[in-house]
Image (cartoon, helix red, strand yellow):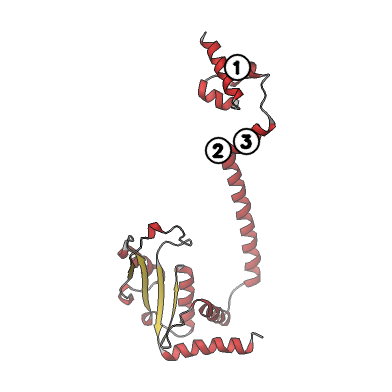
Amino acid sequence: MARKKDKQKAIAMRKKGMSYSQIKEKLGINKSTLSGWLYNMPLSEKRIRELQADNPIRIERYRNTMRAKREKKFASAYHEMSQKIKKLSSRELFLAGLFLYWGEGSKTTNAAIGLTNTNPSMLKFYIKWLDLLGIKRNQMKVSLHLYSDMNIKKQEKYWSEELSIPLSQFRKSYIKDTKFSSITYHNGFGQGTCSVLVGGARLHEKVIMGLRYIQDNLIK
């Protein structure tokens, strides 16, 4: 009697479009028995495709496959670009820094230069560029824009270690009233916004005139 009820349940589930695996999971009946009971109740091709699309294992395999393909493409592109770029000379780094400053550098004062970003790597490059300009680390000041729900001391320590600039050269952090946890788009970085500043009207003049030279002589 119990077996008959199980068969009736299996048939009802099959009519709803359930796979052998789904019915087996619900009733605990092996697939060979289900095959005998339901041999004349095949699923439509459309339903089979739907079940395959919903299969967690298949989805994970697909994701892994796509991830591997994507990583392979990135590796190929990285190799291609590394062959084109090769080792950068000091002149090339200097020019790259000028273009970086042109796009991202501070334009609000004539008495200092500064770069603000959320990406530590960009700021590290900027500091390397400052070194080419003869600026020492102890001449740099750091300012942070953080959010009220952040661990302020932790973030200050993070940036100090990332940039190799002591906390004694940090200005008081600006704390925004909004919460970082409420922001839906973090742009890939979650450590707040960092500005690296260097005072000096003469330094500012050199950078601005370097950019003017590029505009006057290289961009037609």
Question: Tag 1 or tag 3, which sits nearer the N-term?
Answer: 1
Q: Nearer the viewer, residue 49 or 90?
A: 49
Residue beneath the point at 49% across and 74% down: 125
Which residue is tagged 2? 56
> Which SS class for mark 1?
helix
Question: Tag 2 or tag 1, which sits nearer the N-term?
Answer: 1
Total marks shown come to 3
The crowd level at tag 3 (other Cα within 10 Å; few <14, some 14-19, many 20+) is few
> Which SS class for mark 2?
helix
Name the kind of residue labelled 2 in the image.
Answer: Pro
Which residue is tagged 3? 50
- Residue 175 is marked as none
Q: Is residue 48 above or below residue 159?
A: above
Question: Tag 2 or tag 3, which sits nearer the N-term?
Answer: 3
Q: Quadrant of residue 161?
A: bottom left
Which residue is tagged 1? 33
